[in-house]
Image (cartoon, grey):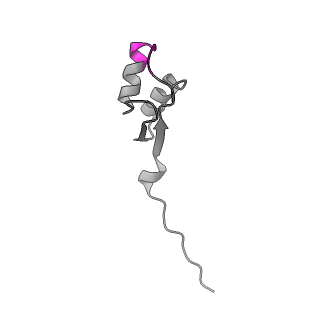
């Protein structure tokens, strides 16, 4: 009996996180607006796929009420 090996999961795919901006940045602090822009999000419902690093996780935590 032979078994098929599963194809390896791409290391890039395993280490990414997708972020969507759900709330408007109007009326938020300037530092939070800069963080949202740093995540690559421009307007509501925009989506950005980023590398999953501690720095990116910290940025997401900072503006978690928007994303």
Report the number of discs.
0
> As rendered, which of 32 and 43 lies closer to the eye?
43
Q: Position of residue 20 (x, y in %)?
A: 48, 36
In the orientation shown, which residue stands out farthest toward the bottom? 1
Vertical order, 49 against 37 (above or below): below
In which quarter of the view is residue 26 placed?
top left
| Magenta region includes residue 27 | yes
59 lies left or right of 3: left
- Vertical placement of 4 versus 16: above or below? below
Res 50 → quadrant = top left
Image location (x, y in percent) of residue 44: 45, 30
The magenta segment is 25-32
Q: Residue at x 47, y 42 (%)?
A: 17
Q: What residue is at 43 percent from the left and 33 percent from the top? A: 56
Q: Residue furthest right?
A: 1
Q: Nearer the viewer, residue 30 or 13?
A: 30
Q: Quadrant of the N terminus?
A: bottom right
Image spot of residue 14 (x, y percent): 48, 51
Q: Is residue 64 left or right of residue 12?
A: right
For the point 40% across and 30% down, the residue is 43
Q: Is residue 65 magenta?
A: no
- Point out residue 16 in the picture as x, y percentages from the top left corner: 45, 45
Secondary structure mostly seen in magenta is loop
């Amino acid at each position: 009996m032979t078994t098929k090996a599963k194809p390896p999961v791409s290391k890039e795919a395993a280490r990414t996180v997708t972020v969507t901006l759900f709330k408007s940045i109007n009326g938020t602090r300037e530092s939070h607006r800069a963080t949202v822009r740093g995540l690559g999000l421009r307007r509501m419902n925009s989506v950005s796929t980023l590398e999953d690093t501690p720095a990116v996780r910290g940025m997401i935590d900072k503006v978690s009420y928007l994303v």
